[in-house]
Amino acid sequence: MIHSKLSKVAAIGLIAASALLGATPARADEVPETETDPPRVELVLDVSGSMRAADIDGATRMDVAKQAFNDVVDALPETTQLGIRVLGATYGGKNKRTGCRDTQQIVPVGPVNRVAAKNAIASLQPTGFTPIGLALRGAATDLGDTGSVRRIVLITDGEDTCTPPDPCEVARELAAQGTSLVVDTLGLTPDEKTRKQLVCISTATGGTYASAKSEEELTDRIKQLVDRAALPPPVTPAVVAGTEDCEGAPLLAAGVYTDRELIGQHRFYRVAVRPDQELRASVSISLDRPLNRDYGVLLKAAAPDGRELVRGVDAGSGRADVLSTGLRWSLPSSDSDSDSGAASNDVCLIVSNSFASATAAGAPGMPVELTVGLVDASDTPDAPGLGRGWLLLLVLAAAGLVAGVLTGWLTRWWVAKWREN
Amino acid sequence: MPIPLTATALTTALLPLLTPLAPAEISTAGTSFLTAVTISPDQPVQVSAVTGDHLYWSFPAGAAQRPELALTVDLPPSADRTGDQSWTVEVFDGLRRRQACVAGAQSPVATTTDTRVTLGCRLRQIRSWAEPWDGDPLPGTYYIRLSTTELPEKDLGLPVEVALTLTTPTGDTNADQGVLAAPLVPENHPGKILTSPAVTPSAEPEPALSADWLPDFSARWIWTAAGGVLAALTGLLGFSWTRRRPQSP
């Protein structure tokens, strides 16, 4: 029992030590984190004629939306940069051409002025058409491209009445331009067509879709979205364009990158890895469009001559937002001894996918997020020099016993022989 | 009054150290790997979301730990749902590689009448070292993703409540040899495209005199030393068997 107690003491010591050791690198990692600007959010509210319908607990959709907006404006964190844009708010006529250009920004993007925002919301009257595509384009312009994360929250009760442009196509096209743009959509008692359109818009930009059938649901959801927007990602990925072969591929330093890849396309990147370094790479492809049920992603590391070094692969089926995989590679230790002349080895990273889409296979490609890391290589440990366990004790005890008996016999034989002579 | 001031300062400085057992509740979740919300073991997580959301959290884990997740999802009212929903919880390591669950209901299906679905996942014991070509769980960051994989299109966007608890019991601390030079944590800085390979000095050669061959202190030292003592004792015993018993008087 002593052994087990002692080993427990040792084990506790080890746990404490490993906890301390484990904590240090995690802290060290937080230091080089770059400063990111607070995210910019724009609420886009549908004020079209259909918002007059009084079908949410007896109140009109417009009243419910106004109340929810007021609650949200009260609850907003001070740091949020928020703007509000409306669509279908001013033109009450029948001319579709004019009605489909009806979208204005009523609160500019910036620190929230609660009183001004509430006054602007209070004066809204449900009026015209539903030009969602145009409003999305307007909102993207309002948010600008300052390098910080951009989020649009679209609240509507009906489908776009001004197609073309198809708002879903507009969303995909906007997301492909500039810094990350996410559109979250909220449907007020949506019908099937509205729901499909909103789901398509949010999927195209990596956003989320929710439906609201009561004021409480609407308020809760907007608050969730604003809370999530208040947590910006720790890094803004650098834009890179992978090539069709390894020869002219961009040479990457450690860090996070973003790119686009078409269905069935291969993208090549290069990384220089020193013999004493380990390459770590991970890739995520966002599923931003309707896709066939089964899919996969492959990240391959290869030597410049095409010899495969290692691969990371993942596959899936059904609904998903991203599909990712990763790999580690370092020069095998036997090679690094003989090959120590080379200062570094070029390694090609090849990102490919096995997606298929019946409806939207073309440009822009699907968003790719590539992370490259270069750290010290880890040594292969030697076989353990020490043993443990009851079997070890038994074997040692038995060996001791046999050795003792043999020594005893030998000594007797030797003493007897010495007496004889 | 320097002494009471110092005492107060000390107490305020120590207070956060003394009460690490009650971490604040987390009420939000990320929507991508980059925005994953960091949680710590035994920290309560209670998040409002909707069906169709993909929710991300991350947590740090060290060698010999066996992280275990337990999730409950309170589903939207049955009247609003039209069919079965498949929920799934997935765990990825710091390189976003999928990690296997060895126990727990990872992807249960909730029927239309269910009011709540329970998910769980226990990871393999985290190893202190693995070959680069290997997918074993290693020390570093882990990501959790909760999502609905299959559900009727009509049932998207309905409110749900998610509760998550993470525990990280420690398993066998010396199951493994070797250490990883750097934990698998994400590189959180923007990349840079180079024109020529970065010239960084290679690591300086190892000093000639090193005690690397000597294993660190561990329970193995105690086992082996105890084995040696035992062998010596049994050796003496064996030796004494071969002696003539002293005649009893």
Image: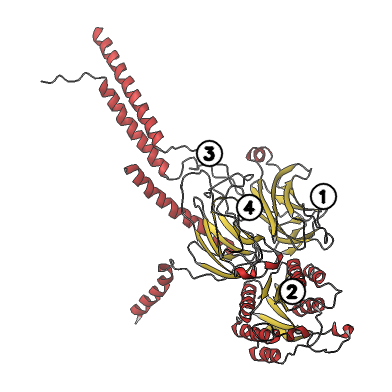
Measured Cα–Cα span from mark 3 to mark 4: 28 Å
Q: Are marks 2 and 3 on the same chain?
A: yes
Q: Residue at x 67, y 37 (%)?
A: A338
Element at badge 4? strand
Respond whether the residues carrying marks 1 and 4 are from the same subunit: no
Residue located 61% across and 82% down the image: A76
Depth check: give the residue in front, A317 or A225.
A317
In this picture, is A88 found above or below A347?
below
Foreground mark, 2 or 4?
2
Q: Closer to us: mark 1 or mark 4?
A: 4
Asked if the residue under mark 4 is in contact with the one under mark 1, i.e. CB atoms within 8 Å, the reply is: no
Visible in this render: residue B186? yes
The number of numbered discs placed on residues in the rendered structure image is: 4
Q: CA distance from mark 2 to mark 3?
A: 65 Å
User: Residue A300 location in percent, x, y?
Assistant: 73, 48
Discs 3 and 1 share one subunit: yes
Give the image location of residue B179, x and y in percent: 53, 47
Residue tagged by mark 1?
A247
Q: Which mark is first along the chain, 1 or 3?
A: 1
Q: Earlier in the sequence, mark 2 or mark 3?
A: 2
CA separation in Å, label 2 and label 4: 37 Å
Give the foreground label among 2 and 3. Answer: 2
Name the amino acid type tagged 4. Answer: Arg
Circle 2 is placed at which residue position?
Answer: A191
Q: Which residue is mark 4?
A: B98
Q: In the displayed structure, would residue A143 be above or below residue B83? A: below
Task: From the viewer's perspective, tell me whether residue B204 is left or right of residue A321.
Answer: left
Q: Is residue A365 or residue A157 the one in the foreground?
A: A157
Image position, residue A248 (x, y; %): 82, 52
